[in-house]
Amino acid sequence: MENHPSANAPYEYSSYELQQQDEEPFPLLDYLQLLWFRRRLILVITLLVSVIGYIQINQLRNIYSASSSILIGIQQAPVSDFNSYMYQYFNNLDSMEEVEILKSRGLAEKVINKLNLLNLAEFNPSLEEPESGFFDFLRSLNPLNWLPDDWSTLFSQARSGEVVTVEPTREEIEREKMVTAVDIFRDKMSVVPVKFSDVINISFESHDAKLAARIANEIPEAYIVGQLEAKFEATQKVTNWLAEQLEELKTQVADSERAVEIYRQENDLSETDGTGLLAKQLSETNSQLIIARVERAEAEARLAQMNRLLDNNRQGLDTSAEVLASTLIQQIRNQEAEAVRRRSELAVEYGPRHPRMLQINAEIEDLERRLATEMDNITLALENKIEMARLRESSLESSLQELESVFDEQSQEAVQLRALEREAAANRVLFENFLSRFKETSSIEGMESADARVLSQAEIPALPSSPNRRRMLIIYILLGFMGACGMVLGLQFLNPGIYSPEQIEHDLGIRAIGMIPKLPQKTQTHEYILNKPHSGFVEAINSLRVSLKLSDPDKRVKAIQITSSIPEEGKSSLAIGLAITMVQSGARVVLVEADLRRSSIEKLLGLPSDVPGLTDLVMSDSDDISGFVIHDEKTGVDFIRAGDARYASATDIFSSQRMQDIVDLLKQEYDYVLFDTPPVMAVADARVLGNLVDNTLFVVRWDKTPRKVARAAIQLLRQGGTDIGGIVLQQVDLKRYGRIGYGDSGYYYHYGRYGQYYNS
């Protein structure tokens, strides 16, 4: 027998196993084949997630986004030195500071109040009406929703540790609504500065397209108004101080001007300049006197000229200014010239005594008399004008003398008046300076209006910005697909079963020498082998038989133990099938039921129960085994029942010398002696019997036997000194194995193509 580790020594992997672990590549192809095999499950999960996502997506409301832009830091006109500091303070703000102002809660509250957004359920959740839908139905399954409202409130308060002491006031409730509305407002607003410019883009999202555009346009307007208000507050101190100073100066100016008026009234002074009222009157009177003298001299000259022309037989009278200015004289002259012309024409036809000639001569004489009378009237008018000029000149001379007398008397009083006027003027100048400063401070309001302006207005969006239902549905489909793939791979990783010979060699460190296909349900192994001798199942057992024979060519293997780690792994079926194929190959085979506690072979084959079995043979002293062997004519295999001596200890029986002798005796009588033993993890029978047989076949059920349990069972067998010839993978689903393609063997990878070699 080979040397095996002791019972206390830890299990060590062989060099072959370590080499396999080092050379194991990443099994990407295996994973892909596993996913392809589970494609129906993946498709169902993907469709389920997609349907749920489609329902949820259709319950989402459209969100419209409107954007406006504002330009800050506009260049202003130069300001006075008095206001330059305030101007620089207000216009040196950074764009990031402006962004924070636009995102401030105060600005949001102003917009909410102006647009009455608290009346909309979008900003006031208390106005929302309950909606019916699939997810609302799921939320209704919450047990808390089944309780009365009072109970639910008390339960929520008790869970959170809150204690209600006083009911909130109406103002507190309204304020809480405003706080909630501001939070919702800020979540829907986006303020982004444009790089390398003073432009800020403002976007707002809402379920109502018109409301989104309206709010996006109102935010910059509210910002500009708020900026003006902030600047006004910053200049309020300066304005108040100037107002106080102006009030004091206004009082001083009023007092000084009142003193000037009182002094002027007391001294009968009405002028505000240095000469006074009398000086002005004196100057005007002197000017009028000069004008009167000039007019008198002019009138006398015109009268002298008129008299000279009259004395000179009226020669040159027509060039006189008075004659030229008289329209009546000009008319008489024109009539006289017309009459003279007509007399010349009549003189050609008629004599001087002709009545018509006498008539025209009388007409000319009448015109000359009228002309002489008009000349006399002009001369008389000039004489009257000269007389009036002389009287006026005399009057002005008298007034001038009186004014000069009065002016001399009030000269001394005017000196004191000018002093009072200078004081009043100084106070007035000081008041006007402060008033000018006050106006300059107030003029900042004009600059505030030009500090920022709306660059572009928000338009009503025609299409919603979100949700992107197509993209969301694609995401749901991808998530469902990836989740299904992850679940399949996760279940595969969590499954402790063994799937391939490569996995057996990798995890258990022992070579796999056979893979036995799974038979249809309620199919007996011996009947299937007898009815379908050329099936793939029979060929798999024959392959196992050959592999077992070639496992150790230098050693004659006759006694073989077939065991497993746990029950229901198909070791009894394998033992029956292996025995039948050995008989069909011409060997003499005996199958011993070594599971003394739970015999199953005699039940599977329907063997008679009145024949003594293994325990009876051990208890007897006879070497004749013919009375203990049952020959099955149908299968050609000899069987030895477990026996009826159930009172004996199985461990004592297998560890006895009598058992060793029986094994040697059976090996002499038969070519192969097969022992169907109980599971290793259940009892110690297989570990004891393993020292009596030539080889041990360890059975692992495909996709069922946990790797840890199989590894522990093998470790127990090795610790007991059992020689394990190989591991048989039992009840393999070949179609599933071929589709998934476990490991690298590819032994049954294309099972459908290999099936043409079998007749099932």
Image (cartoon, rainbow, N blue to C red):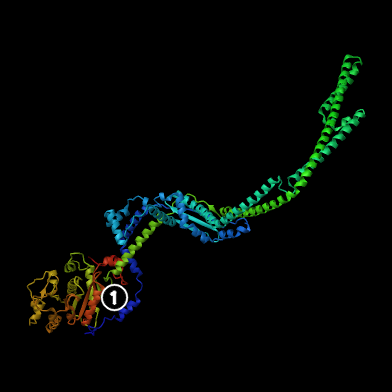
Instruction: From the top left corner, tell me how far across and down residue 357 is, in percent.
Output: 89, 17
Residue 222, compared with residue 596, is above or below; it is above
Which residue carries the number 1 mark? 507
Q: Is residue 393 above or below residue 147?
A: above
Pinpoint residue 218: horizontal percent, then vertical percent.
49, 51
Residue at (73%, 47%) from the top-left corner? 276
Say if residue 750 shows up in the picture: no
Task: Look at the image and tell me in which quarter the N terminus lies.
Answer: bottom left
Q: Who is closer to the viewer here, 137 or 672?
A: 137
Judging depth in this view, the residue of 744 and 644 nearest the camera is 644
Residue 384 placement, left or right of 233: right
Q: Quadrant of residue 176?
A: bottom left
Secondary element at image label 1: helix
The x, y position of residue 731, in whole percent, is: 23, 69
User: Looking at the rendering, in which quadrant would you find the C terminus?
Assistant: bottom left
Q: How many marks?
A: 1
Q: Is residue 160 left or right of residue 258?
A: left
Q: Residue furthest right?
A: 312
Circle 1 Cα neighbour tier, 10 Å, few/some/many (<14 / 14–19 / ≥20): some
Q: Nearer the viewer, residue 480 or 287?
A: 287
Location of residue 570 with respect to 440 vertically, above or below: below
User: Which image quadrant is residue 491 in?
Assistant: bottom left
Residue 621: quadrant of the picture: bottom left
Amino acid carrying mark 1 in the image: Asp
- Residue 516 % position (x, y): 23, 70
Residue in front for this viewpoint, 318 or 508 = 318
In this picture, residue 166 sits left or right of residue 576: right
Work out whether residue 285 can be spotted.
yes
